[in-house]
Image: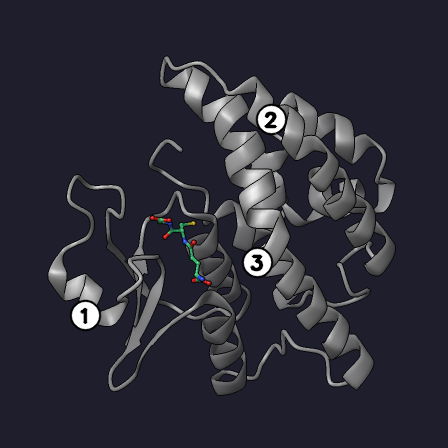
């Protein structure tokens, strides 16, 4: 039994679901509303005291932190492998995962996508200053991933890896903002990768049903 506790609109939850789909593993998505008034229920906070999603639960093991979950899934279900064997390639993958967590998520998703796309669709005004100050960091992230990745077809070359699973949901949202589209125009490898990866079954079948 594999359970993913979280919400389908979350990019982190989607990364785990994409990895599960790439591996052909079945699971159930147990809905957790982290933005519910008062926060998530106490029994969820017992599993994830920081109140973030996702949590992975198997019969006898519970784990949070997306990178840890992704590596655990890959190591416990080795085929098809989503981590390269070559130490340099694996290091590159881990470097990309770190960049996504440390720099990309906040900037691409919250400071650009949420401000430019989600807020206006909810009837509130985008914070233009926040968007403007995110553009420099967003350009740096895109430029650096364009330089570090082999793409295409995948970020590390010929096979999909955990880096693709984690990057695709973030870049997909970033691209929905006009600023995201503009910045990605300067990154042909990354743009081609995104276009191809988002056509994959693992990406299409994890499309959120809940509006973002
Ligand atoms: N370090 C966590 C981060 C996960 C994360 O930030 N998830 C977001 C949703 S995409 C979340 O739970 N946000 C709720 C909040 O920040 O209150 C991980 O790697 O799993």
Where does residue 8 sit, x and y in percent of width and height?
Answer: 36, 47
The label nearer to you, 1 versus 2, is 2
Front residue of 128/179: it is 128
Q: Residues within 10 Å of mark 3 (few under 14, many from 20)?
A: some
Image quarter in which the C terminus is found: top left
Which secondary structure lies at badge 3?
Answer: helix
The residue pinned by badge 1 equals: 46
Q: Earlier in the sequence, mark 3 or mark 1?
A: 1
Image quarter in which the N terminus is found: bottom left
Residue 169 visible here: no
Q: Which mark is residue 201?
A: none
Image height check: is 115 above or below 14? above
Residue 88 visible here: yes
Going by the image, does 57 lie left or right of 83? Answer: left
Where does residue 26 sit, x and y in percent of width and height?
Answer: 37, 68
Location of ligand 1 given as a quarter of the image: bottom left
Q: Is mark 3 within 8 Å of ligand 1?
A: yes
Q: Earlier in the sequence, mark 1 or mark 2?
A: 1
Where does residue 136 sit, x and y in percent of width and height?
Answer: 74, 35
**Residue appearing at x 66%, y 77% in the figure:** 83
Residue extending farthest to the left is 42
Going by the image, does 12 lie left or right of 107? Answer: left
Q: Which mark is residue 131?
A: 2
Q: Residues within 10 Å of mark 2 (few under 14, many from 20)?
A: many
Disc 3 from disc 1: Cα separation: 23 Å
The residue pinned by badge 3 equals: 101
The label nearer to you, 3 versus 2, is 2
The quadrant in which residue 179 appears is top right
Front residue of 112/31: it is 112
Going by the image, does 178 lie left or right of 36? Answer: right
């Amino acid at each position: 039994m594999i359970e993913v506790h979280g919400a389908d609109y979350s990019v982190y939850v989607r990364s785990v679901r994409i990895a599960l789909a790439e591996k052909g593993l079945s699971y159930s998505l147990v809905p957790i509303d982290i933005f519910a008034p008062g926060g998530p229920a106490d029994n969820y906070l017992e599993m994830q005291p920081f109140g973030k999603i996702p949590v992975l639960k198997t019969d006898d093991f519970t784990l949070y932190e997306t990178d840890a979950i992704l590596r655990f899934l890959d190591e416990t279900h080795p085929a098809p492998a989503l981590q390269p064997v070559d130490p340099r390639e694996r290091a590159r993958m881990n470097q990309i995962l770190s960049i996504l967590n440390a720099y990309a998520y906040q900037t691409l998703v919250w400071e650009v996508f949420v401000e430019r796309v989600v807020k206006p669709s909810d009837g509130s005004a985008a914070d233009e200053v926040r968007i403007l100050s995110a553009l420099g960091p967003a350009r740096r992230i895109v430029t650096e991933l364009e330089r570090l990745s082999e793409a295409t077809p995948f970020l590390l070359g010929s096979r999909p890896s955990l880096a693709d699973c984690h990057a695709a949901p973030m870049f997909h949202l970033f691209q929905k903002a006009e600023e995201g589209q503009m910045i990605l125009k300067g990154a042909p490898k990354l743009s081609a990768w995104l276009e191809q990866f988002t056509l994959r079954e693992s990406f299409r079948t994890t499309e959120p049903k809940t509006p973002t």
